[in-house]
Amino acid sequence: MKTRIKELRARYDLTQEELAKKVGVRRETIVFLEKGRYNPSLKLAYDVAKVLKSDIEEVFIFEED
Amino acid sequence: METTKTDKIIGVLGIFFCVGAVALLMTTETIDITIILALLVAGVICIVTGFSRCLGYRKGPRTDERTRKLSAFAATYSWFITFMLVNILFLLDYFGRLTITVSQTLGVIFFIMLVTMFGMSAYLKQKGYVE
């Protein structure tokens, strides 16, 4: 899974810490999300997309095996 | 991020442990010093953990969905390893290869439970995720 979190975060001038605080998770979770090393729940994906003012499909790019 | 109710409970529990340890030391003459020390250490750990957020040492929520998932997996692996160990101990005892008391068995099991839980938890947190 690829994500555009880093790019969108930069667009809205948000740090990992700020994004983590807004979605109510630990900063490490945002780090792993950005690296595409953690598949979030639908709720977390929705919350992240909402904070980044985007649709889930724009933020998280799922690749079929 | 403000101090949560859980943090406060842990902090207060720590104070109780410390006060209890001092009270035991002052009122009982025959008590083993190890118990007093264990209570004091537990108390200090609780106080530091409970009030770490107040002191600004810890930011963000205590847990989130990722850490909860990691903890659940760590507990599962720990349980499985302990289960295997209990079976091995039983077999060793059954075939007369090892003779240990109930207290020793419990000690070994508690030790393995703690070590595997912390070990798996640290490993999974360093890895970052579980699928």
Image (spheres, coloured by chain):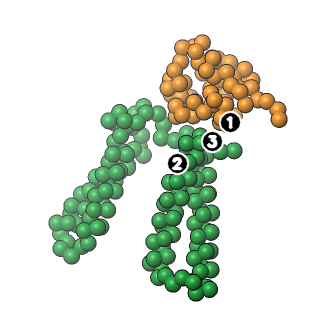
Chain colours: A orange, B green
Q: Which subunit holds the residue at mark 3?
A: B
What is the quadrant of residue A30 in the picture? top right
Report the Cα–Cα distance between label 2 and label 1.
Answer: 20 Å
Q: Which subunit holds the residue at mark 2?
A: B
- Residue in the picture at 48% in, 67% down: B110
- Residue in the picture at 83% in, 35% down: A65
Secondary structure of the residue carrying tag 2 is helix
Q: Is residue B86 above or below residue A15?
A: below
Q: Is residue B76 left or right of residue B19?
A: right
Mark 1: amino acid: Asn
- Residue A26 appears in the figure: yes
Q: Residue B95 location, x and y as percent?
A: 62, 86
Residue hosting label 2:
B122
Within 10 Å of disc 3 (Cα), the crowding (few <14, some 14-19, many 20+) is some
Q: Are marks 2 and 1 in contact (CB under 8 Å)?
A: no
Mark 3: amino acid: Tyr
Q: Which subunit holds the residue at mark 1?
A: A
Question: Viewer-proximal residue, B85 or A17?
Answer: B85
Mark 2: amino acid: Ala
Q: Residue B84 location, x and y as percent?
A: 62, 69
What is the quadrant of residue B67 in the picture? top right
- Residue in the picture at 65% in, 35% down: A37
Q: Nearer the viewer, mark 2 or mark 1?
A: 2
Residue hosting label 3:
B129
Within 10 Å of disc 1 (Cα), the crowding (few <14, some 14-19, many 20+) is some
- Residue in the picture at 74% in, 26% down: A61
What is the quadrant of residue B33 in the picture? bottom left
Question: Viewer-proximal residue, A32 or B97?
Answer: B97
